[in-house]
Image (cartoon, rainbow, N blue to C red):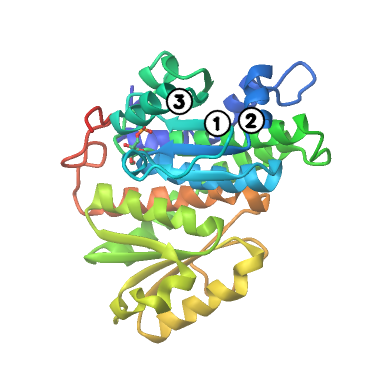
Amino acid sequence: EKGTYEHFMLKEIDEQPLVMRKILEAYENEDNRLALAPEVLSATTGCDRIYIIACGTSYHAGLVGKQLMEKLAGVPVEVHVASEFSYNTPLLSNKPLFIFISQSGETADSRSVLVKIKEMGYPALTLTNVPGSTLSREADYTLHLHAGPEIAVASTKAYTAQIAVLAILAETTAKAKGALNDFDLVQELAITANAMEVLTSQKEALEELAHAFFETTGNAFFIGRSADYFVCLEGALKLKEISYIQAEGFAGGELKHGTIALIEDGTPVVALDTQAAVHGAIRGNVQEVAARGANVLTLSMQGLEQDDDSFVLPHVHELLTPLVSVVPMQLLAYYAALHRGCDVDKPRNLAKSVTVE
Ligand code: F6R
């Protein structure tokens, strides 16, 4: 099944442009407009707040989903780590809608929240790559991710599929509310798929960067602001789970509140700059860490790039940048793990589907 690939992870990274196109095909109607079942849209337009519940990478996709849902559809969203929700249940709004995001649809931590909120009588929508899975069967509605089987333990194409489906949910919700009529998500996602393809064709450059930055290091930092912060959390998780490099993703603004103490000569810092509104601020952070000796790998979006940036991402809509900025993060993690001789597809201590709490 791996074909010519040495690892499923690399194959699955490469499949991402195709997955974007499959998602568009699956959610487009005859008029080439994005469409969802009316009952799903009544749930999103009829609720007063959405609670997204997920774990790990799926939680990181949820953070991006919150921004999409709030900015495009104007629906307030909270995102919760499933295992925390059970004992730190927030005060709920009057008409909550719960959205469970789970590649496998079998994650026990998420399921335990689903059981609890169903007992409370609240509606649930599951986004999963496995229709018919437990989380799909026990929820009221399901949206399929259409990513195809994900075999590598480290999730890649499911993350981007989750974000794309969340974008579709946000766009169709907005349009059902009579808003956002000049936004063409079909076109924006098509542009994004092309951008992902450009990135997957630049593996050699990313392999060299992975070699230069992560070959011998024991730790690494990922900094970004706004949507870039969420992708930094995911970039750090990818790196740590497969290369065993201790990695931390955090908001650029938090540097001076503690983490900058850890920066010394040669510390690798991956900086992400795709958001025009925080461009100046993140560049300020880059200078702060560089001045303390950090080895900075800057990934910037076309239009925001500067002369000595390590890598420039093709331009896509500002709300969809996580779909492209995560690709070099995935590839950096992959090559870092490969060079360090790690078992890329089956990292130690981890299971593909976590069915115990
Ligand atoms: C990381 C990873 C995990 C999963 C998490 C949730 O690469 O794969 O963090 O995202 O265990 O799994 P699902 O999405 O199946 O609920």
Image coordinates for residue 82, horizontal then vertical, percent = 36, 38
Mark 3 CB within 8 Å of ligand 1: yes
Residue 128 is tagged as: 3
Question: Which of the 4 image quarters holds residue 323?
Answer: top right
Q: CA distance from mark 2 to mark 3?
A: 17 Å
Q: Position of residue 212 (x, y in %)?
A: 33, 66
Rendered position, 219 above or below 141: below
Residue at image coords 64%, 30%: 44
Residue for point 29% across, 63% down: 214
Dot placed on the residue nearer the N-terminal end, 1 or 3: 1
Q: Amino acid at mark 1?
A: Leu
In the rendered image, the vertical position of residue 208 relative to residue 77, given as above or below: below
Q: CA distance from mark 1 to mark 2?
A: 7 Å
| Residue highlighted by disc 2 | 44
Q: Amino acid at mark 3?
A: Thr
Please determine whether, in this image, residue 273 is positioned above or below residue 131: below
At x 31%, y 40%, the residue is: 83
